[in-house]
Image (tube, coloured by chain):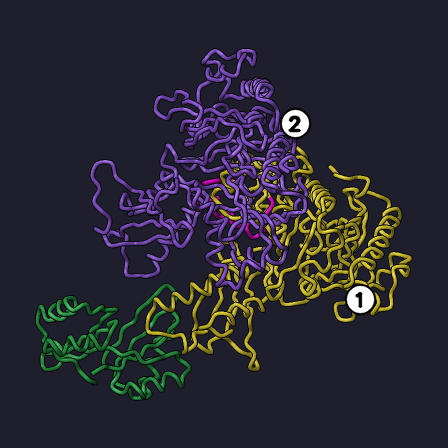
Amino acid sequence: MIWNKQAECENRDDRKVKQLYNLKKLVRHVYETIPFYKKKFDDLGVKPDDIKTLADISKLPFTTKDELRETYPYGLLACDKKDVVEIHTSSGTTGTPVLGAYTSNDIKMWGEVMARCLCMAGGTPDDVVQNGYGYGMFTGGLGVHYGSHTLGCNTIPISSGNTKRQLMMMRDFKSTMLTCTPSYSLYMAEQAKEMGIDFKDLSLKAGIFGAEPWSDNMRKEIEEKLNLEAFDIYGLTEIVGPGVSNECQAHNGLHVNEDHFYPEIIDPKTGEVLPEGEKGELVFTTITREGTPIIRYRTRDITWLWHDECSCGRTTVKMHRLLGRTDDMLILRGVNVFPSQIENVLMRIEETEPHYQIVVDRGDSHLDEVELHVEVEPNFFTDETKSLEKIKAKIGAEIKQELGISVIIKLVEPKSIARSEGKAKRVIDKRTL
Amino acid sequence: MKVKQISVFLENKNGRLSEVTRILSEGEISLRAMTIADTADFGILRIIAEQPDKCLELLKQHNFTARVTEVIGVRLDDKPGALHEVMQIFEDNKVNIEYLYSTLMLSDDKVVIMFKVEDIDHGLDIIMQNGMEAITAF
Amino acid sequence: MIGDLYADEELERLDRDALRALQLLRLKKTVEAALLTPFYSKRLKGVGITSAEDIRTLDDVRKIPYTTKDDLREAYPYGLLSVDRSEIVRMHASSGTTGTPTVIYHTQKDLDQWTNMTVRSLRATGCTKEDVFQNMMTYGLFTGGIGLHYGAERLGMLVIPASSGNTTRQFNMMKDFQTTTVHATPSYMLHLYSRMEEMGYSLKDFNLKRALIGAEPHSEEVRQKIEELFDIDAYNSYGLSEMNGPSVAFECTQKKGMHLWEDAYLVETIDRSSLEPVEEGEMGELVLTILIRTGTPILRYRTKDLAAIIPEPCSCGRTSRRITRIKGRTDDMLIINGVNVFPSQIEEVIMKMPGIGTNYLIKVRKEGTLDKLTIHTEVGAELFTDNAQDLHNLRRRIVEELSASITIKAAVELHEPGFLPVQQGKAIRVVDERGSVF
């Protein structure tokens, strides 16, 4: 089933006309109402009237995550505050979050694009959607939730974690679709074995997995172990949350909901737009957002775009599953983490200095296991195990507070963290996708 | 009266302990007692050496996190009930023991038990007041 | 002034006779829906009710047997479903007395009706679309978070779906978005205040006007304390997932008891031993029938909550009667930081642990302003190993299993044998040291 045939299967030229219309409208609106954008446009000497074709978008300035932070909280709000009905925030690189504000039209649009994604994965109103993404400020939970309601599925808002309960619900309520991070799905598979649950006896037909990078190998493993068809989904809070793009049943790239999110691929070094099919950094302009629209947002994600005649009938542009990042951001259990955040935490804690290393691995559990190695400084080493345990607990609690994830703190001997040319290697990522 | 104990932070991994013993052996340090407190992922090695200052110096040179902790060494007769006698005195006088261990020494039919107590001055006073013998050094 | 605060003036001020007529109409519809469920068709037929027509007056509700939490458990998973599964658009679950949860299904119409009640409740406390609403209740299967979320959005408030926990972030957002209204448990409000200064904030940083408090019993003194500390209005609320969730009853700006929305719920108060109705105004167990839900109809549900109906009309003009704050429970359910926990759930987990057997004690106490659950257990010879790692693992396993079962992170303390008192007769395994909150 295609949720919105009109939009998703539209003739490409007709779509371009609408995209251009919306782009022009947005550009004029942000230029006239948001000082931040006016200044950026003026600095480049570009006026809203200069946008005559879609290709003219390359004349517009980029927006970066740092700029979103600098304008926090309301610097990029494009509507009256009274019209905002919901906000979400995602963590920034150094603690200042990034805001996504939604009007009620934005919430409807979000539900619409997520409903499309569920349909791309074979969803219908008869499905039982078990939504294992975290609910709250993280966009994963509520985004899928709105889409599932828009489509009319039975929505189980189970949120993340509590694996036994997840499996029990899945069995007892015959969930047909599962949404969560790919690594968590494999963790569920392990736990199911212990509980004596065989996925062959369950009713899952599809899983929509995202919020962290994964591979075709993992897809095979997930499909085998959970006995379902696995789909990749992409989205980020700065744009809307989940629902930006999703795989269809052809499993050949993710269809971008480009009537709402206009994509480009640029050379991350020069900022130049690359021709279709070339690999580079993904950039989005949210041409229909009302709350916090964004012009040419640099996602730092590396992929490429192409058009083909997809067997599903959708004509929307496709993006390849993510190939990497242009910065040092880590995705741990679906949470975006910058090493600088960890450094900040250690700086804040009196006893410690930021001599650390993050070791990420996927053990038997299939979940990201994050160890933070902190060198024991002579100034906080005491003869008592309990005081060292206390410092460990303190670091752990602060990290949890800052990043929202639990990490294992390991105290290590000084200078034991490998340094190359005097600079310690901060991240050891042992995960194989 | 107080004995200098060297406490060393050790990760629970292969070879760390032997690294310590190697350094001390090469530095010709004589050990008198040794014990390890272990937790799930690290340990604290406690050493009584004949040359504590040199021992500390050597370990620090080799990048170990080490420090001096003061403890009491009580010399006891090697006979049943000797330890209990001290323990009873400590209990009666509210000397709070954090940990204790015995030394490698056995001479003149005497043994030495090392005590780490909360308030070392109070602990030593009690030992002296009760006519027991605290060693000064090895 | 109050006149501005109605979400639906006609319904909220419906005269009592018309209100009762509406209740009867809706009760019949609910009974009709109930007869379609496997559970109620059997139970209602057992007392001679075979069609909605057997309910002629509101008093006829007393022909219907009570429904208990155990009944809901027995009906798990689909015994109380009255519509085709494809009609269901949402389910919520709360913990049962043991591992089996209590599940409620909602159709789209059910959700819309529930949202109407939450809009009404929010309006009654003075909320408007200009308000910034930081929802500090947990989002997910628990109804506390999502319940008010929809109402606040429908009302046009700016909703911050903060969910529970993460105090630093709560403060940041309260400041950055100039939050005017929060929804939290009373103990979390006190916790926020106790951390405010050390986290570098003062009341001047905020724009807080009101707190909607609920999900755990508290006294009038606690409300007043919250109001004084933050210089705000605090409104009490009542709800349970079996009856949708928040917005069964809510205080209006008069703050003299909670309006139980009688067009949506039929309320009775009964004597907990004789199960006979008590006089209006007297303390009894609340028994509720939900009149606005067809997906999972529940008739005469014994809430185990003790309260009294306030017979006098409220000066705000709303005709739905009020109930007093909840004065106690008729069972051993513990409410720990807003989460309902039955000791039997904890026991179930602990009994599964090898080597522990019956040597355990469940303790609840206040740590600062929050509740702390500690499980004390003895480590017998068969459990003890010299390896610190083994004991560490045992402790972790208990913590994990408990958090899976009751969603609460408990502390586990291991003791030497003999630490726990020897039990004779019926063992006391729960010690609640929080003092009386009722």
Residue C59 in sight here = yes
* The color chain B is rendered in: green
Q: Which residue is mark 1?
A: A40
Which region is colored magenta? A179-198
Identify residue type, mark 2: Glu
* The color chain A is rendered in: yellow
Task: Note whether B37 is above or below C15 in the view shown.
Answer: below
- The residue sitting at 73% across, 37% down in the picture is A1
Q: Which residue is mark 2?
A: C10
Q: Residue C53 appears at what percent x and percent y?
A: 56, 11
Q: Residue A346 appears at what percent x and percent y?
A: 50, 70
Quarter the C terminus of chain C occupies:
top left
Q: Residue A320 appears at what percent x and percent y?
A: 72, 55
> Residue A279 occupies which quadrant of the picture?
bottom right
Quarter the N terminus of chain C occupies:
top right
* The color chain C is rendered in: purple
